[in-house]
Image (spheres, rainbow, N blue to C red):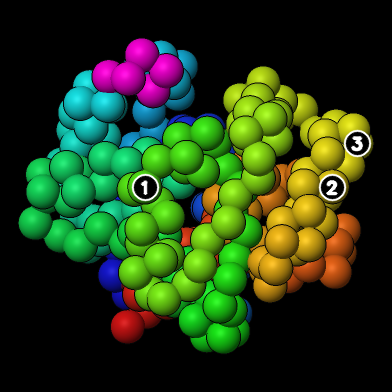
């Protein structure tokens, strides 16, 4: 079994799910008392958030690159950045190590292709929804990406930072997300990417008929599969 390196803490609320989902997937495959071999470096999200909103992505890249090198040095065979937004600096992190980095948008795109999705809605932070670093990975696979209007993009992102990253799960916010998901479907989206690792804490597939692609689950389960190859 390969050793999985996780760069977590962005937020720790969703990193907990990564640990659980990876171990559940390994147990399903191997049975018994088997569990995943995981090394975790957890960063201080407040520091990262400050860099995000100051536009200091180079400083964020340095923090995550340092974490990646620590994981490689500790024996990780490959690495996951346990957040969608920070894949803005994924290329810099990958360049800092000699082991593979499993890109969250690429494995999500593969999951969409497996379900023959041609047009997909994207929810996430304003950075993920508005900047090209994430969408281009999905569009490179021939899938059209649509996002909410500007007001709703701000609302989706505000709920992430001010509620979900703090462990606050509000019924009002769930209804807001479900409204926005329905509006994306009305624009022709055949499915919606939950493109922030915290959104799946609030919105579940049972809440809507629109197919949801939870990036936390997809990323974690892809790591489990890779660890058993």
Query: How far apart are labels 1 and 3 at the CA level?
Result: 31 Å
The quarter of the image holding the C terminus is bottom left
Q: Could you tell which of marks 2 and 3 lies nearer the N-terminus?
A: 3
Q: Locate residue 197, reporting x and y percent.
A: 56, 46
Q: Is residue 217 left or right of residue 58?
A: right
Q: Residue at x 49, y 81 (%)?
A: 113
Tell me what residue is drawn at x 68 percent, y 72 percent: 190
| Real-space CA distance between mark 2 and mark 3, rounded to the nearest whole angstrom | 12 Å
Q: Is residue 35 visible?
A: no
Q: Earlier in the sequence, mark 2 or mark 1?
A: 1
Say above or below: 198 vs 165: below
Helix, strand or loop for disc 1: helix
Q: Position of residue 111 (x, y in %)?
A: 51, 76
Q: Is residue 193 visible?
A: yes
Q: Nearer the viewer, residue 21 or 124?
A: 124
Dot 2 lies on which element? helix
Disc 3 is placed on an element classified as helix
Residue drawn at (72%, 56%) of the image: 184
- Which quadrant does the N terminus fall into? bottom left
The residue at which mark 2 appears reads as 179
Q: Nearer the viewer, mark 2 or mark 3?
A: 2
For mark 3, does the 10 Å Cα neighbourhood hold few (<14), some (14 to 19), or many (20 or more) residues?
Answer: few
Q: Which residue is mark 1?
A: 132
Residue for badge 3: 171
Q: Is residue 206 left or right of residue 15?
A: right
The residue range painted magenta reads 52-56
* Percent coordinates x, y for residue 160 in the rendering: 64, 32
Q: Was residue 151 drawn as part of the magenta stretch in this picture?
A: no
| Cα gap from disc 2 to disc 1, whole angstroms | 25 Å
Which picture quadrant has residue 57?
top left
Which numbered tag is attached to residue 161? none
């Amino acid at each position: 079994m390969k050793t999985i390196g996780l760069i977590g803490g962005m937020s720790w609320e969703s990193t907990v799910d990564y640990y659980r989902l990876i171990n559940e997937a390994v147990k399903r495959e191997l049975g018994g008392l088997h569990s995943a071999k995981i090394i975790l470096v957890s960063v201080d999200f407040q520091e990262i958030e400050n860099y995000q909103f100051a536009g200091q992505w180079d400083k964020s890249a340095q923090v995550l690159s340092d974490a990646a090198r620590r994981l490689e040095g500790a024996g990780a065979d490959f690495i996951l950045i346990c957040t969608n937004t920070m894949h803005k600096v994924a290329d810099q992190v990958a360049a800092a190590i000699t082991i593979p980095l499993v890109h969250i948008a690429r494995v999500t795109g593969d999951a969409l292709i497996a379900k023959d999705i041609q047009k997909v809605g994207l929810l996430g932070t304003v950075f993920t929804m508005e900047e090209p670093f994430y969408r281009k990975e999905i569009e490179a696979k021939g899938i059209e990406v649509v996002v909410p209007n500007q007001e709703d993009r701000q609302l989706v992102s505000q709920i992430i930072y001010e509620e979900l990253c703090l462990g606050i799960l509000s019924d009002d916010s769930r209804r807001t997300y479900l409204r926005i998901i329905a509006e994306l479907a009305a624009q022709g989206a055949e499915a919606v990417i939950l493109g922030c690792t915290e959104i799946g804490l609030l919105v579940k597939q049972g809440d809507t008929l629109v197919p949801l692609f939870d990036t936390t689950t997809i990323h974690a389960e892809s790591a489990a599969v890779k660890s058993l190859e």
